[in-house]
Image (tube, rainbow, N blue to C red):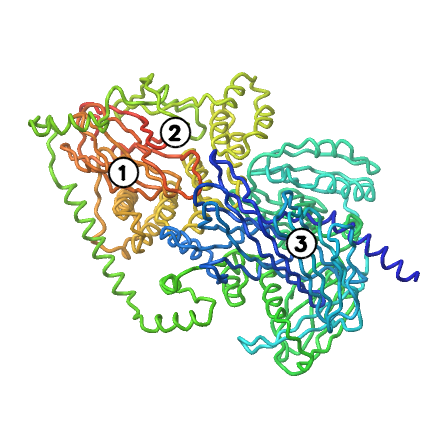
């Protein structure tokens, strides 16, 4: 009886501790409401099934969401997981039946999703974003209708000594119409222990053959309490499990053990470097828990010196402290008063510049701005993380690589963390075995052991023995032997995937080095990794078109039959593409070679009627056109590191007001570009604040505007005007923190960085966008142009030519002409470039007096560029060639642009640039759209001048004046 009471007390304490350790958020679909704010869809049904075998568990959630809006929506499904949990299944309802997801390359998954969505067909795409967060784009979510999906994940359960703990954090705040949960514990002698605190009344484990089962269901149930139960260890528990993979015929083994943890006191550090991540996302850390751990540690150390380093997008601040007798109150006060702001650039850290006996690194390890690799030193790193969304693999890597330890405070108690930080890291060191009998054992590098430990590998013989060695680096202290016998096999089907997950986990520590290997394993074992996704398609034609093997056997058979009949026509297609490109470029060259008159056009009766009709329909620029409140010349001194022109406008509804002008003179004549004061409440408040107080006031305002990219763009500009470029950059970098892997936000950020001449940072961001959106030619073009500005012209023309050879969707009409003109401009302005691989028909310098380019950040959005010349003739998508020879590119109705206007020989006089927000057909409810205008004079010549403006448009059917410029006699040569 005493023994049972002890066990129950132990279980209660274990479950109580677990509820405080785990902070995994709940799954949710977010959509934009009528005001553009992201709101969760109602979850109408949730069915959870849990299956455990030994210390391995599979959790499956079947969710049904309800769209109560009066329009079809596209939504984003978010599913955060804890450390060591891996998605194993994703399925969507298609035509009334559940269709399983297929693992594909991440960029391919995005490309296929975008293409299929445009056909109004049901696809689904599940991606692993930074940290252990999973995101799925869901379309369509029917108006006043339901969307059902299934997601499952696998994990190794934590050994709590008396048994294995299963913990499911349920934090749903709103009632669910129909909720149910079922747990199956397989091959278990003793009943699992569930602490029933009336949250799941009736959830009792009942024996069924060799298994235990428990069920619970309720209507209109608020599932806001965690589900926890302990699986007591029994005689039936196996330390070694072997399973055969029917696909490959290989035998995979899995060994689990509780090694004796031999504590060895480490050398007490006399000098510590403490790195504190103060990026915006770090505000979510559990500071209380971190402080308590440091308090215990510093009191044990007693006397030492410490250098405190604050970092976000760069190293922001450094301070020194002398700690006597463990009194670190001044340091603690400094930590608690830290301001969290900016993106995270781990590559800004060089540990070799901070000499110390030990490094304490407080961060989630997620780098989202610029370079992501820390330059490590030989100093041991104690990495401490208290957030559920974290880059666990990288934090493990920097600690294990340096002989330190990774402390995930979501997974271990303070008592466990204190032991790990005070003693030399007790680790799994190596294994010994017959290499002909065993292969590919993971992990196979020193790995810190906190409680229990497991390895997995491939068994090539019927029987053998393997020894696992433990100790501290350089000192083997304990060895455990295990017999591997092929006769003792299991049939759970989990072990091969566990092996694959362990291999991926180790390779992922050095992701860039092993990216291709991770991709291959993820596809082979249907595991979502950093570079793979799970996609669900509806039609067999789509599986065939994109070369994706479907999941169902019957569909798979049809797929192989069709693929087998298709011939490899790659060379023919490439030649055909080059011939088409050459033909299109020839037409552009013919335009360039045509001599157009610079005289006034003849005013024939027919022409005058046409112009009058266009003007009456509002199609010709005039004095009455609606523009913003003010048009000012650009102040070049407002921008550090900047000689080119950049501006930001936020425009709402039309206002019939004439611009107030300012002029800028130079070789380009007279230029007036849009300068707009948004007159937003936050800028008005900042303008009334003294310079020394503007940053604290900004931080306070940020609490209300943290979800607005416009806020960070505007305020960044404000700080630039106040001659605080480093603070302005930090504020701008917050856009990278707003949503993980959002290409629209990243494009806005990258364009702004390029405008401010932070070309290297811009290239980092555009490289990420290219990985996310390789199906869009703009991703190649944007990166190439930044490379050109970064003094990397060879990389620029190489990536442009790569894009030119690809087949693009019809929504990007003739974008090749834009890229051909830009590629030839780069070639003309840079010598000694290697162009041998480029088709000679595509190389010709075509300089022009005027080039205007319009880009925007939104997909499925139609913007139109209008340019009106001194003859008062407007060039736009419906009138693409003017009397002067002004030429407009094709109309981009599907999003992004670019649309461009070129004029080989400019007539003197004034030119007007306008933008027409024609409309959008996004399934997500649109907010503002950010647009960029680039104005080039003497384009493609050595004396080329470039000026840029950025605006934000909100209302469809809005026409705004972007700027005007005057060409004087002989000003362009």
User: In this image, 171 relative to 576: left or right?
Assistant: right
Label 2: few (<14), some (14–19) or many (≥20) C-alpha neighbours in 10 Å: many
Are the residues flagged by discs 3 and 2 in contact, CB closer than 8 Å?
no
Which residue shows up at 30% across the image and 65% down it? 570
Quadrant in the picture for residue 626: top left
User: In this image, 946 relative to 967: left or right?
Assistant: right
Which label number is shown at residue 646?
2
- Using the image as rendered, state which of residue 479 and residue 745 is in the foreground: 745
Q: Give the distance between the C-alpha atoms of the residues marked 3 and 1, in whole angstroms.
A: 53 Å
Comparing marks 2 and 1, which lies closer to the viewer? 1
Earlier sequence position, callout 3 versus callout 1: 3
Q: Quadrant of the N terminus?
A: bottom right
Which label number is shown at residue 402?
3
Q: Give the distance between the C-alpha atoms of the residues marked 2 and 1, in whole angstroms.
A: 18 Å
Earlier sequence position, callout 3 versus callout 2: 3
User: In this image, 661 relative to 908: left or right?
Assistant: right
Label 3: few (<14), some (14–19) or many (≥20) C-alpha neighbours in 10 Å: some
Label 1: few (<14), some (14–19) or many (≥20) C-alpha neighbours in 10 Å: many
Q: Quadrant of the C terminus?
A: top left
Q: Give the distance between the C-alpha atoms of the residues marked 3 and 2, in whole angstroms.
A: 45 Å
Quadrant in the picture for residue 275: top right
Which residue shows up at 63% across the image and 50% down it? 377
- Using the image as rendered, state which of residue 599 and residue 115 is in the foreground: 115
Secondary structure of residue under mark 2: loop
Q: Residue 95: give x, y in percent of width and height.
A: 44, 59
Earlier sequence position, callout 2 versus callout 1: 2
Q: Residue 218: give x, y in percent of width and height.
A: 67, 52
Which label number is shown at residue 900?
1
């Amino acid at each position: 009886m005493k023994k049972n009471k002890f066990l129950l007390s132990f279980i209660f304490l274990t479950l109580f501790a677990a509820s405080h350790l785990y902070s995994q958020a709940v799954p949710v679909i977010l959509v934009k409401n009528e005001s553009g704010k992201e709101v969760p869809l109602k979850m109408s049904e949730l069915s959870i099934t849990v299956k455990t075998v030994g210390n391995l568990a599979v959790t499956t959630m079947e969710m049904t969401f309800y769209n109560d809006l009066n329009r079809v929506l596209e939504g984003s499904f978010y599913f955060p997981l804890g450390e060591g949990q891996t998605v194993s299944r994703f399925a969507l309802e298609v035509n009334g039946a559940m269709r399983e997801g297929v693992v594909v390359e991440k960029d391919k998954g995005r490309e296929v999703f975008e293409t299929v969505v445009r056909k109004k067909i049901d696809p689904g795409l599940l991606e692993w974003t930074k940290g252990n967060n999973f995101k799925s784009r869901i379309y369509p979510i029917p108006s006043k209708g339901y969307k059902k999906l299934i997601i499952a994940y696998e994990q190794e359960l934590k050994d709590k000594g008396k048994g294995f703990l299963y913990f499911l954090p349920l934090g749903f705040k709103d009632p669910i119409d129909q909720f149910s949960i079922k747990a199956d514990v397989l091959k278990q002698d003793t009943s699992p222990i569930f602490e029933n605190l009336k949250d799941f009344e009736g959830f009792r484990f009942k024996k069924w053959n060799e298994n235990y089962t428990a069920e619970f269901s309720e209507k209109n149930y608020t599932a806001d309490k965690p589900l926890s139960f302990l699986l007591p260890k029994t005689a039936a528990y196996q330390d070694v499990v072997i399973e055969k993979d029917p696909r490959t015929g290989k035998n995979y083994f899995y060994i689990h053990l509780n090694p004796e943890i031999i504590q060895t006191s480490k050398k007490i550090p006399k000098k510590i470097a403490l790195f504190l991540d103060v990026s915006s996302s770090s505000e979510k850390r559990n500071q209380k828990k971190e402080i308590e751990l440091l308090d215990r540690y510093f009191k044990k150390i007693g006397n030492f010196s410490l250098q405190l380093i604050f970092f976000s997008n760069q190293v922001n601040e450094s301070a020194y402290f002398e700690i006597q007798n463990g009194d670190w109150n001044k340091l603690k006060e400094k930590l608690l008063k830290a301001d969290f702001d900016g993106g995270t650039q781990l590559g800004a850290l060089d540990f070799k510049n901070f000499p110390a006996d030990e490094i304490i690194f407080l961060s989630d390890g997620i780098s989202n701005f610029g370079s992501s690799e820390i330059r490590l030193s030989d100093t041991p790193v104690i990495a401490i993380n208290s957030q559920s969304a974290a880059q666990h693999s990288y934090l493990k890597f920097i600690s294990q690589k340096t002989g330190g330890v990774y402390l995930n405070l979501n997974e271990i108690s303070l008592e466990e963390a204190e032991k790990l930080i005070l003693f030399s890291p007790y680790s799994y060191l190596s294994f010994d075995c017959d290499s002909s009998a065993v292969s590919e054992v993971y992990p196979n590098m020193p790995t810190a052991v906190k409680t229990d430990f497991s390895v997995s590998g491939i068994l090539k013989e019927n029987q053998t023995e393997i020894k696992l060695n433990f100790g501290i680096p350089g000192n083997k202290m304990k060895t455990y032997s295990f017999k591997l016998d092929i006769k003792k096999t299991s049939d759970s089907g989990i072990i091969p995937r566990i092996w694959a997950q362990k291999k991926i986990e180790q390779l992922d520590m050095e992701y860039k080095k092993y990216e291709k290997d991770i991709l291959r394993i993820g596809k082979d074992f249907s595991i979502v990794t950093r570079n793979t996704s799970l996609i669900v398609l509806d039609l067999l034609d789509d599986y065939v078109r994109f070369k994706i093997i479907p999941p169902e056997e019957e569909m798979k058979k049809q797929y192989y039959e069709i693929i087998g009949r298709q011939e490899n026509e790659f060379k023919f297609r490439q030649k055909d593409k080059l011939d088409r490109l050459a033909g299109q470029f020839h037409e552009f060259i013919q335009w360039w070679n045509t001599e157009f008159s610079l005289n006034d056009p003849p005013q024939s009766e027919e022409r005058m009627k046409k112009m009058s009709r266009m003007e009456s329909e509002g199609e010709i620029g005039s004095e009455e056109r609606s523009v913003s409140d003010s048009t000012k010349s650009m102040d070049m001194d407002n921008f550090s590191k900047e000689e080119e022109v950049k501006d930001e406008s936020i425009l709402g509804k039309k206002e019939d007001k004439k611009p107030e002008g300012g002029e800028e003179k130079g070789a380009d004549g007279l230029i007036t570009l849009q300068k707009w004061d948004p007159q937003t409440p936050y800028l008005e408040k900042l303008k009334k604040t003294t310079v020394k107080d503007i940053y604290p006031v900004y931080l306070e305002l940020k609490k209300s505007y943290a979800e607005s990219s416009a806020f960070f763009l505007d305020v960044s500009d404000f700080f630039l005007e106040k001659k605080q470029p480093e603070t302005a950059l930090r504020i701008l970098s917050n856009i990278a923190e707003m949503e993980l892997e959002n290409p629209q936000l990243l494009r806005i950020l990258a364009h702004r960085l390029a405008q401010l001449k932070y070309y290297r940072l811009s290239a980092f961001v555009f490289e990420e966008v290219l990985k996310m959106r390789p199906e869009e030619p703009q991703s190649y073009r944007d990166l190439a142009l930044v490379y050109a500005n970064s003094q990397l012209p060879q990389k620029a023309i190489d990536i442009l030519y790569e894009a030119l050879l690809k087949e693009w969707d019809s929504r990007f009409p003739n974008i090749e002409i834009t890229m051909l003109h830009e590629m030839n401009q780069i070639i003309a302005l840079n010598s000694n470039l290697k162009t041998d691989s480029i088709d000679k028909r595509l190389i010709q310098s075509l300089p022009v007096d005027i080039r205007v380019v319009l880009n925007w950040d939104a997909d499925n959005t139609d913007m139109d560029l209008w340019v009106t010349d001194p003859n008062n003739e407007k060039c736009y998508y419906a009138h693409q060639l003017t009397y002067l020879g002004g030429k407009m590119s094709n109309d981009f109705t599907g999003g992004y642009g670019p649309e461009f206007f070129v004029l080989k020989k400019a007539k003197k006089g004034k030119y007007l640039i306008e933008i027409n927000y024609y409309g959008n057909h996004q399934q997500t409810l649109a907010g503002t759209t950010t647009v960029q205008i680039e104005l080039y004079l003497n384009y493609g010549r050595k004396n080329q001048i470039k000026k840029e403006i950025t605006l934000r448009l909100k209302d469809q059917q809005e026409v705004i004046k972007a700027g005007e410029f005057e060409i004087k006699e002989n000003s362009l040569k």
